[in-house]
Image (tube, rainbow, N blue to C red):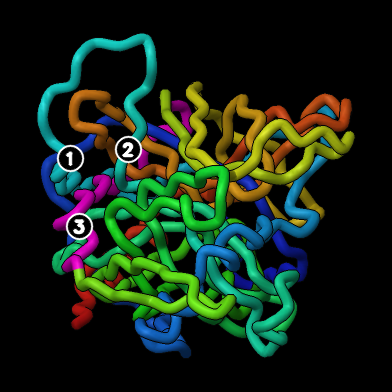
Amino acid sequence: MKSRARRLTIPLAGVLMATGWIGATAANATAPSDVISKAAGASSEEATQFWTPDRVKAATDAADNLDVTTKGGKASKSAPDGPPGSVPPIGQEGGKSAKSKHVNLPNTVGRVFFTLPGADWRDKKNWKFCSGSSIQSKYRNLVATSAHCVYDTKNNVFYDNWVFIPSYWDGDKPWEGKAPYGMYAAKTFNAHDDFVVKEDYDFDYAFVNVHSGVKIKWEKIDNSWKPVVKNVGRLGDNVGGQGFTWNRSTKATVFSFGYPAGEHPDGDKPFSGRTMKWCYGKTGPMPAAPKYNLQEHVGFKCSFTAGASGGPFLYSYKNSSRTGYLIGVNSVAWDTDGNDRYDHISSPYFNTDTYKVYKAAANKWTK
């Protein structure tokens, strides 16, 4: 295990991690002092109504030099720091699906939108997005994502106007952006002290408690968008929630989901961010990356680019229920052969520290 004394000052972008089978019950743990919880600055109404169709369309991926180029390198020393544990998925998507050559995409996964804190909210360069997923919690109000999708390490502040849109789909026209299950604004951000204070990307994960959702019908009147709002209830009741697992093997077969949109280092841009994409593979320890003081990541072959950050690594994913167990989040994109193309995605290894942050968040209530 790494020392808590080290510091990191560089931002990140990417995806994933995985491991073994899910046990029956979660291990006991007390809420630690190194869990940082921060109330969102904007109200639910302010955040959801900020994101008009035009602004959603104009948002760009949040990544900024969140990649690693390396050839070879010694594998990291990711390893359990206690017994494995798991929490089952809500499973509200339920039902058996017909056999198909295609992967049934999870309704729990969606896009996260936010604005840069302290910046001019009218300037579209400050409208950003990542990916995230609904996850099991006591009050069915929790989104898992990357810490760099909730906290700005450059300005040392949490993002503004943070919302989650599960199962997001983007049409060809501004009014065709789809939020089939509504939009959910942040109530409380929960992250590890080692990311928020020390900027340590081995702790690049966060859990966000969200308000009950709303569906907004936008009408353009006099060249201005006007909202018609309908309350839709709790996130987990509407889309279910993935399970959670920690202290598993570093070698596991996983799916990763997200909304990639950024360029490869060579300038090629194969993804638009308009629809959900997926990768499938077996994870393993990644090399240490001095660029990010990164020592405990796991990853697998995947060509995701920026925008997929925060999307889930799901272990034991079942197409019939569209649920599995969160074992990582998209964090860093890797070019392992130096050909200016991302070919791996990685996640912090989920250990007892991760579970403590999750547990603290999973027991928080929101109106």
Q: Residue at x 60, y 75 (%)?
A: 115
Q: Which mark is residue 290?
A: none
Identify which amino acid the numbered label 3 is placed on: Gly
Which segment did they paint magenta? 232-252
Residue identified by numbered label 3: 236
* Label 3 SS: helix
> How far from the left and from the top, in percent, is residue 241?
24, 50
3 and 2 marks in contact (CB < 8 Å): no
2 and 1 marks in contact (CB < 8 Å): yes
Q: Residue at x 19, y 31 (%)?
A: 321
Labels 2 and 1: the sequence-earlier one: 1
Identify which amino acid the numbered label 1 is placed on: Glu
Residue 75 colored magenta? Answer: no
Residue identified by numbered label 2: 106
Q: Is residue 281 above or below residue 326?
A: above
Q: Is residue 246 visible in this depiction of the protein?
A: no
* Label 1 SS: loop
Task: Measure the C-alpha gap from mark 1 to mark 3.
Answer: 10 Å
Q: Quadrant of residue 287?
A: top right
The residue nearer to you, when weighing 181 against 37, is 181
Labels 1 and 3: the sequence-earlier one: 1
**Crowd rating for badge 3 (residues with CA inside 10 Å; few <14, some 14–19, many 20+):** many
Q: Is residue 199 above or below residue 293?
A: below
Looking at this view, name the residue that lies furthest to the front.
222
Residue 235 colored magenta? Answer: yes
Residue identified by numbered label 1: 93
